[in-house]
Image: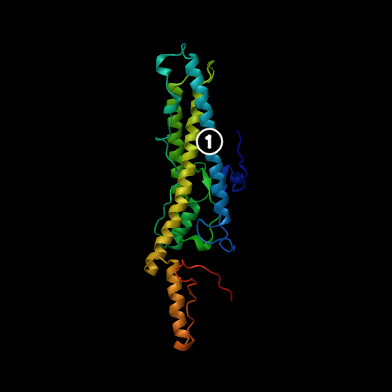
Amino acid sequence: IDVSLTWMLQNTSDQDSSFNCSFSIDREAKSCRAPRQNEEIFAAMAFFNKMTYWSRKIRETMEHVASLTYTRGSYHSVKPESHVDINSINDDGVFVPVLPLFETPVEQSKESNALTSSSDSITPTMLISLGEQRDNEEMSPLLPIEDINKFLSEQCRSLSSALTKLEDSYPPSSAHTLISAAEASLVLLSHHICSIAEHYCNGVGYIEEMLRSQLVSAIGKEIRSEDFTEFILFHNRKLFKNEFVPKPFCHAIRRPEHYPDGVLSI
């Protein structure tokens, strides 16, 4: 069971002991049509779908091994409180830092911008960095890097707490058992990977739907194919005089007392 990490490694770099995210969308490309309809997002979602499939296969394998272990009674030498069903493991208490959040940009003075840029510099407590900020991104609605690192810190804290609870509920890795705390941790991590992938795909879809709703609200209605037909007919009435207006091409071909059938050639 393997999975390629090429896409993730191509979009991150390790500089000054901090992960620098380099993912971006080429808005000038002809294939870029919307936040979700572009090559970069297609590649990202394909990667997360593969990670989801890989995580599920890992979890299914561990659950199969656990079922064999319970059947053969390998836990007789383990304390009763360690008899925890591996199928009950979930990541409900682990924070997922992937959220489609925006904030209203507020114009700041040069002095506050200088403080912000200095605080954005890489510090030992930061988990990731977004690289240098461009001038046209000063009024971006995206969350600042400080908030993103707070989300990641909460994820690490909640994940570490969940792993500690598993170590207390399962035999240690040094025990001669097929299912130990290491395997239980692997199941938990596989659940968390699936949650991250699901939040990412749902977040991208949410942003796409948000822009679509704004567009429909600006137009006043949802445009359908019938509306384009009506527009062309209205446009033709303005261009042509009544005697030159194109007539709909619709002819019924039938024989007497028969269902309409036949051949029409032009």
Q: Nearer the viewer, residue 210 or 242?
A: 242
Q: What is the residue that sits farthest to the front in this orientation?
A: 257
The quadrant of the image that shows the N terminus is top right
Q: Is residue 85 left or right of residue 186?
A: left
Residue, x 43% and y 66% (percent of image)? 224
Q: Secondary structure at mark 1?
A: helix
Q: Is residue 91 above or below residue 256?
A: above
Task: Estimate the x, y position of residue 194 in percent, counting from the top left.
Answer: 49, 39
Which corner quadrant of the image does residue 28 belong to?
Answer: bottom right
Can residue 15 be seen at all in this image of the molecule?
Answer: no
Quickly name the residue at label 1. 55
Task: Estimate the x, y position of residue 203 in percent, counting from the top left.
Answer: 45, 50
Q: Is residue 107 left or right of residue 1?
A: left
Q: Is residue 104 above or below residue 51?
A: below
Task: Estimate the x, y position of residue 119 in percent, counting from the top left.
Answer: 48, 51
Residue, x 49% and y 28% (percent of image)? 185
Q: Nearer the viewer, residue 30 or 264?
A: 264
Q: Is residue 215 left or right of residue 5?
A: left
The quadrant of the image that shows the C terminus is bottom right
Can residue 27 be seen at all in this image of the molecule?
Answer: yes
Q: Nearer the viewer, residue 264 or 36?
A: 264
Give the mark count.
1
Specify the amino acid type for callout 1: Ser
Residue, x 51% and y 19% (percent of image)? 68
Q: Categorize mark 1 by other alpha carbons within 10 Å: few (<14), some (14-19), many (20+).
A: many
Q: Is residue 108 above or below residue 201?
A: below
Q: Nearer the viewer, residue 242 or 231?
A: 242
Task: Estimate the x, y position of residue 207 in percent, counting from the top left.
Answer: 44, 55
Which corner quadrant of the image does residue 159 belong to?
Answer: top left
